[in-house]
Amino acid sequence: MTQEFIATGRRKDAVARIRMTVGTGKIEVNGRPFEEYFKTTNLQNAVLQPFETAKLVNQFDVSVNAHGGGTNGQAGAVRLAVARALTEVNPELRALLKPEGLLTRDPRMKERKKPGQPGARKRFQFSKR
């Protein structure tokens, strides 16, 4: 059996769990080819960025289970998971991936709604009389 590398990435409300094996560069997200799942080239490039930085394009097959958030958050989550899996494959790649910010979890989250107001920051309309 080929060795399998498992990693998790998160961004906003999106969570991506990946299984990476040595292969031909086939990336599948929720059972669909990633070009079909992430329609814009920006999102596709975000997913491929860790491979390009590490110069390992088309050397691994990736199976992704992504849920929560939107496509942008999911692409960021997949990017982090791939970068983490690559450091599992070869710890020396950390020196290449870290300066590019690929191993940093984006901490920005949606602010919670507060009681007594309609949103996180918005207040109900004030009426003097």
Image (cartoon, rainbow, N blue to C red):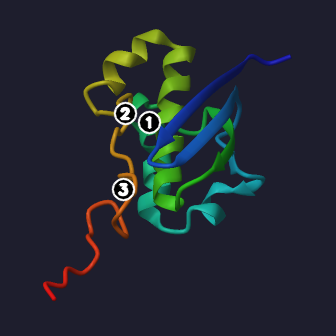
- Specify whether 95 is left or right of 59: left
Q: Earlier in the sequence, mark 2 or mark 3?
A: 2
Q: In the image, which is nearer the foreground, mark 1 or mark 3?
A: 3
Q: Is residue 83 above or below residue 44?
A: above
* Image quarter in which the C terminus is found: bottom left
Q: Is residue 32 above or below residue 83?
A: below
- Specify whether 128 is left or right of 112: left
> Which residue lies under the disc numbered 3?
114
Residue at position x 13%, y 84% from top?
Answer: 128
* Image quarter in which the N terminus is found: top right
Can residue 56 be seen at all in this image of the molecule? no
Instruction: For the residues labelled 1 and 2, say whether their Cβ atoms are less than 8 Å apart.
Output: yes
> Which residue lies under the disc numbered 1?
50
Name, please, the residue furthest toward the right: 1
Asked which quadrant contains residue 100, the reply is top left
Instruction: For the residues labelled 1 and 3, say whether their Cβ atoms are less than 8 Å apart.
Output: no
Q: In the image, which is nearer the foreground, mark 2 or mark 3?
A: 3
> Which residue lies under the disc numbered 2?
102
